[in-house]
Image: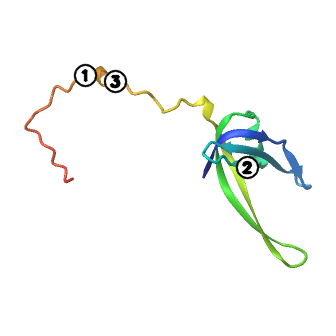
Amino acid sequence: MEVQGKIKMIGETKSFGSNGFRKREVVVTTEEQYPQHILIEFVQDKCDLLNNYGVGQPVKIGVNLRGREWVNPQGETKYFNSVQGWRIENLAAQPQGGAPVPPADQFEPASDMNDEDYDDLPF
């Protein structure tokens, strides 16, 4: 899945626990009729992917939805979801619409056309 929009906020990398689990959050605001502010977390070595990005940049982020179950001390089961990023792309660096197509008058006309040739495709 992908989320596309402009970066609203990039957090600092935070470390948790004795084994050095790392997490970094970014908020992307979508550009649609009703903009959404989507919190996306990058974990472990993926935290470094955010180093070259800043607030206001248009990006496309590849994400995975993660869900987990937790039972609290009272025995109640709770469920939590997170949106985890694994790739980020700078949309400002890409040309819009792909490579331009030359006008038709720049193509050489076909010289080997034969009116007797027919199209025998079944559709």
**Residue located beneath label 2 in the image:** 40
Q: How many marks?
A: 3
Q: Are marks 2 and 3 in contact (CB under 8 Å)?
A: no
Q: Are marks 1 and 2 in contact (CB under 8 Å)?
A: no
> Label 1 crowding class (10 Å Cα cut-off): few <14, some 14-19, many 20+?
few
Q: Specify the amino acid type for callout 1.
A: Glu
Q: Quarter of the image holding residue 12?
A: top right
Q: Position of residue 122 (x, y in %)?
A: 19, 53
Disc with the residue nearer the chain's start (1 vs 2): 2
Q: Quarter of the image holding residue 69?
A: bottom right
**Residue located beneath label 3 in the image:** 103
Q: CA distance from mark 1 to mark 2?
A: 51 Å
Residue at 66% x, 46% y is 35
Q: CA distance from mark 3 to mark 1?
A: 11 Å
Disc with the residue nearer the chain's start (2 vs 3): 2
Q: CA distance from mark 2 to mark 3?
A: 43 Å
Residue at 60% x, 52% y is 1
Query: Camera-side residue: 112 or 76?
Result: 76
Q: Residue 80: which disc?
A: none
Q: Specify the amino acid type for callout 2.
A: Ile
Give the mark toward the camera: 3 or 1: 3
Determine the secondary structure under disc 1: loop
> Label 3 crowding class (10 Å Cα cut-off): few <14, some 14-19, many 20+?
few
